[in-house]
Image (tube, rainbow, N blue to C red):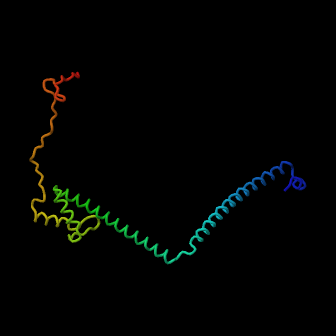
Amino acid sequence: MRTEELAALGLTKEQISKVHAMNGKSIAEHEKKLAELKAECESLKAEAEKAEAALLSLEGVDAEQVIAEIQSYKDTIAIAKNNFDKQMTMRDQKAWVDKKLNEYGINSSFARQQLTADIMAEDSGLVWQDGEYYGFDDYMRTAKEKDGSLYQEKDTSAVVETPRFTGPVDGHLKIYGESRKMPKIF
């Protein structure tokens, strides 16, 4: 409302200025909402134009061919996932077997290779389940019966001599064939 209309209603100048301030706040809020709605409208128009362009690009495309390509991609992904899962299982199996062979004290690299290959073979009779081979201990007992030298017994009686560091003799040090006198540190 205009100032003259408010004055005709009998409002004072102070009251009229408060009414104008309240009206101004209300207008500012509505203008802000209007700006937000206009921005959203522009965004939706851009999305609609993009979608329309995408639909126009699909004109003349054979749906059966697209479905066949999608199925081909799905099959390729399934094969890759299956191969990946097999590789991860083989990695876990090999790590488990290596750990167990360490526990059994098998140090020969050739024996470890052969045992690992035999254990991981599908016809070994061992079943991989829950992160371990069931029947592994029986398999190793049988392997020891067949080859008694498979396990190396640890020799605890052997005394290991620790290395000794030697220094110059008679205060002289030989460096590259030259005899040099050792410097005094203290």
> Looking at the image, which residue sits at the far right?
8
Counting from the top left corner in percent of width and height, residue 64 is at 49, 78
The image quadrant where one finds the C terminus is top left
Specify the quadrant of the image occupied by residue 121: bottom left
Q: Quick check: can you spot residue 65?
A: yes
- Image position of 141 (left or right of 49): left
- Image position of 138 (left or right of 48): left
The image quadrant where one finds the N terminus is bottom right
Counting from the top left corner in percent of width and height, residue 166 is at 15, 32
Counting from the top left corner in percent of width and height, residue 152 is at 12, 55
> Looking at the image, which residue sits at the far front?
60
> Looking at the image, which residue sits at the far bottom?
64
The residue that appears at 74% across and 54% down in the rendered structure is: 28
Specify the quadrant of the image occupied by residue 83: bottom left
Q: Quick check: can you spot residue 105?
A: no
The residue that appears at 30% across and 64% down in the rendered structure is: 89
The residue that appears at 12% across and 43% down in the rendered structure is: 160
Q: How many marks?
A: 0
The residue that appears at 19% across and 23% down in the rendered structure is: 182
Front one among 60 and 155: 60
- Image position of 125 (left or right of 13): left
Counting from the top left corner in percent of width and height, residue 167 is at 16, 29
